[in-house]
Amino acid sequence: MSARGIGLCFMLGLSGCGAAPTKSPNSSLGSASEVERLLPLENNTVFSYITTDEAEQTGIYVMEISRPRAALAELKVAGKVFRRSISKDGVQAASGGYVLHSPLSADAKWKGEFGDVSVKSMSRTIKVPAGNFGDCVETYESVTTSDYTKSATSVFCPGVGMVYYKVEGEQDGVMLSQKLELKSYGPRFVVGTK
């Protein structure tokens, strides 16, 4: 597998993240939980991220969110759909690991999509192309196997969702790095609607 192909595989692990700044009409969890506040996953929203790889080449990563049911979010990336379960415990990937898990605290830890996750900051401030964000939660996920190493840093901001993601790893002696920074987010535009 090429370095680009391995990088894409690493990138697909992040696709459980993103959100929009509006209240979900199908929330079954009552008032917004801390996890919902940091990862709202609102229906009909679109996020675009500037991507940068280990060679400093840039691109774009676009994700569209839909909510067919209150307890399910679907994230569409390049025609592929990734499902996320929403509950009072947090946002969970189809693999069983959590993107974000409640309760969130400075010493929180949980099983993630590919490794062990820990909270690194409960008050991260970050600047990305979409703007400046504060009071964000930064998480770190990592795994080491006999075949590869992989780690990811994610930043989730209130009312927005994931604004930053960086994954690094090594497989077959090839070092890889992919970074996403939020460029824009908002409602999906549909031609012919008011």
Image (tube, rainbow, N blue to C red):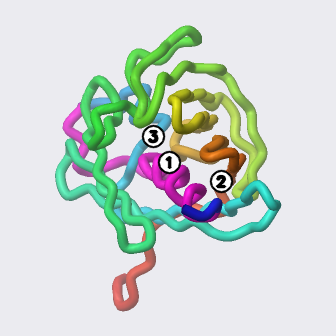
178 left or right of 142?
A: right
Task: Verify CB contact (< 8 Å) between mark 2 and mark 1.
Answer: yes
> In terms of sequence position, does the residue under pointer 2 or pointer 1 come before the other?
1
Disc number for residue 14:
1
- Give the numbered dot on residue 39: 3
Q: Is residue 137 left or right of residue 89?
A: right
Residue 45, given in percent of the width and then of the height, sits at 43, 62
In the rendered image, residue 39, in percent from the top left (x then y), is placed at 45, 40
Residue matched to label 2:
180
Q: Secondary structure at mark 2?
A: strand
- What is the distance, in whole Å, between disc 2 and disc 1 at their CAs? 10 Å
Q: What residue is shown at x 37% (from left), y 31% (from top)? A: 98
Q: Secondary structure at mark 3?
A: loop
The type of residue carrying mark 2 is Leu
Look at 58% across and 12% down and name the residue there: 106
Q: Nearer the viewer, mark 1 or mark 3?
A: 1
Please determine whether, in this image, residue 108 is positioned above or below residue 13: above
Q: Which residues lie in the magenta part?
A: 4-29
Distance, label 1 to label 3, CA atoms, is 13 Å
Question: Please, is residue 170 above or below residue 178 in the view?
Answer: above
